Structure formats: structure tokens, C-alpha cells
Amino acid sequence: MKVEILGTGCPKCHRTEEMISETIKKLGIEAEIIHVTDINEIIERGVMMTPAVIIDGKTVMEGKMPSEAQIRAWFQR
């Protein structure tokens, strides 16, 4: 599983990455987590608001921080 957090490095982006990492560990899931900070790459992917979260190529959230419940829902499908 590949999880990408798109954001230029703001506190919300870093916190989103931390929350996802913590939740994945709690659930015992193996995943590669990548933080994409290059603004050109973010724009190329069609993301207009950060933080954004992409899981296996699908954008699951854009423009806000997820709750732990939302993160759990993404990985328990």
C-alpha cells in the first residue's frame, strides 16, 4: 500500500502525516508513506488545497486534516 501526503510542509501537513503513521502502526498495516512537498508535482496531480492524502493513487481527502476515525475508515475497507 502506498500513502502519499501532499503539502508544502505546513504544520497541518506534518500533523496529517504523523496521524496517518500512528494510525497505521496501531492497525498493524504495512504501508509506504511519502510526503510530497514539491508544489509543481502537487499541482500536476490536480490538488488545489493541502494537505491532501492519496492512497494507492486515489485522492481520499483534500484541503483539511483528517480525524483518526476517517483515517481508520480508509484502511479498514
Image (cartoon, rainbow, N blue to C red):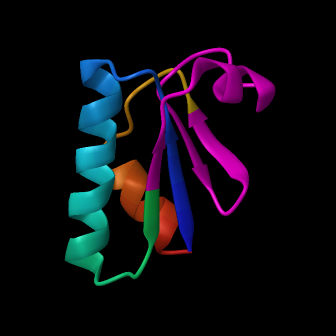
Is 74 rendered above or below residue 16?
below
77 relative position to 30: left or right: right
Identify the residue at horizontal 32%, vertical 39% (top origin): 16
69 relative position to 75: left or right: left
State the image coordinates of residue 64 (x, y, percent, origin top left). Answer: 44, 24
In the image, is residue 37 part of the stretch drawn in magenta?
A: yes
State the image coordinates of residue 41 (x, y, percent, origin top left). Answer: 68, 29
Number of labelled discs?
Answer: 0
In the image, is residue 33 part of the stretch drawn in magenta?
A: no
- When asked about the image quadrant of residue 30, the answer is bottom left
State the image coordinates of residue 35 (x, y, percent, origin top left). Answer: 44, 43
Question: From the image, which quarter does the C terminus lie in?
Answer: bottom right
Question: From the image, which quarter does the N terminus lie in?
Answer: bottom right
State the image coordinates of residue 17 (x, y, percent, origin top left). Answer: 32, 45
- When asked about the image quadrant of residue 29, the answer is bottom left
- When asked about the image quadrant of residue 47, the answer is top right
Is 17 rendered above or below residue 13?
below
35 relative position to 60: left or right: left
Between 41 and 4, the residue placed more toward the observer is 41
Identify the residue at horizontal 23%, vertical 47% (top origin): 18
Identify the residue at horizontal 68%, vertical 20% (top origin): 40
Between 49 and 6, the residue placed more toward the observer is 6
Between 67 and 4, the residue placed more toward the observer is 4
Identify the residue at horizontal 56%, vertical 26% (top origin): 38
What stretch of residues is rendered in magenta?
34-61
Is 4 rendered above or below residue 42?
below
40 relative position to 36: left or right: right
